[in-house]
Amino acid sequence: MERVRSVADLDQLCRHFRRELIELLHSKGTGHPGGSLSCVELLTALYYEIMRVDPKNPEREGRDRLILSKGHAAPILYCVLAEKGFFPAAELTTFRQTGSRLQGHPCRHKTPGIECSSGPLGLGLGAGLGMALAEKLKKSDARIYVVMGDGEIQEGAVWESAAAAAKYRLDNLTAILDFNGVQLDGTLEEIMPPGDLTKRWEAAGWNVVNCDGHQISQIIEAIRIAGECKEKPTIVIAKTIKGKGISFMEGRHQWHGKAINDEEFERAMQELGIERGEWNGGFHS
Ligand SMILES: Cc1ncc(C[n+]2csc(CCOP(=O)(O)OP(=O)(O)O)c2C)c(N)n1
Ligand SMILES: [Mg+2]
């Protein structure tokens, strides 16, 4: 697909990704819908407006890199990478099958476009800071993006990495927090209240930008501001809704990692504005 630029086009692309994701997870009877749906706009903005990547040469020197630290959202990343051309879209049908390159969590050594294996939460920021430091030493202008979950940042390693990134003044490192307020089995407020995240990250030495994580134009602007900040890493705190786009999934931790049954699938398709029959042939072979 050509690089698309208008916000309307990108919104349309997000709708396509939601549809593809729901078809994929329904057909496989597995996966993580909630946390995938909350970062659709974030990944779309990054891959279609911000990052310099080359799907035909995924290892190109000087490329920007994205680490999906909340690795359970792998299925939506696979949808985006396939659409970008990192691997054939037909391969999505192999999701989570033995021998597939598209496992339940991202694997650096198997899948074109995956920059870092992830799944165990809390490790992506440390990997990202290492990459950012390496790019600085090489005097490259490549940028590193790390997408984290808000439950994920309860991990202590996140804050060790945050301190190191501030110490090394890694202004080529941008963290993006998928701030959906929900984790695996409840809300953040119920399980571990996050407090004032802007103040916490500022205290760690970071530049902080807040935005609506479902508004493409706000995401692009927030990351542009991050790119202009010198001598500090930036975190974009993107307010999102877990399960965004499917009413019965929105804000509900029960949809963190639940399979989609046939009736739920049909309701979801209707909500996405896709008529019965239109999805025939999707991933149902
Ligand atoms: C170290 C570690 N502990 C626990 C888990 C199990 N786990 C997978 S996803 C998840 C919840 C993550 O919540 P959040 O970071 O808010 O993600 P999102 O809401 O974006 O899906 C947990 C506890 C894990 N993958 N890694
Ligand atoms: Mg969350």
Image (spheres, rainbow, N blue to C red):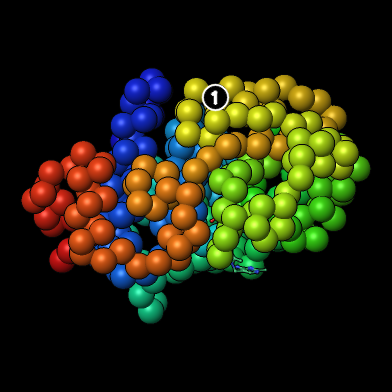
Q: Is residue 127 visible?
A: no
For image coordinates 63% across by 41% down, the residue present is 176
Q: In the rendered view, would you say 24 is above or below 67?
A: below
Q: Quadrant of residue 32?
A: bottom left
Q: Quadrant of ligand 1?
A: bottom right
In the picture shown, does residue 261 fall above or below 273? below
Q: Position of residue 178 (x, y in %)?
A: 58, 45
Residue at 40% in and 22% down: 7
Q: Amino acid at mark 1?
A: Gln
Classify mark 1: helix, strand or loop.
helix
State left or right for residue 128 relative to residue 91: right
How many other residues sit within 10 Å of disc 1, few (<14), some (14-19) or many (≥20)? some
Where is residue 52, by image quadrant?
top right
- Residue under numbered circle 1: 218
- Above or below residue 264? Residue 166 is above
**Residue 195 location (% of width, % of height):** 76, 45
Instruction: Mark yes or no: residue 160 visible.
Output: yes
Considering every residue shown, the one lying at the far right of the view is: 167
Classify residue 257 by image quadrant. Answer: bottom left
The quarter of the picture where the N terminus appears is top left
- Residue at 48%, 34% (x, y): give it: 214
Q: Residue at x 77, y 40 (%)?
A: 196
In this view of the protein, which residue sits in the foreground, 108 or 241? 241
Locate residue 225 relative to residue 138 in the image: left or right: left
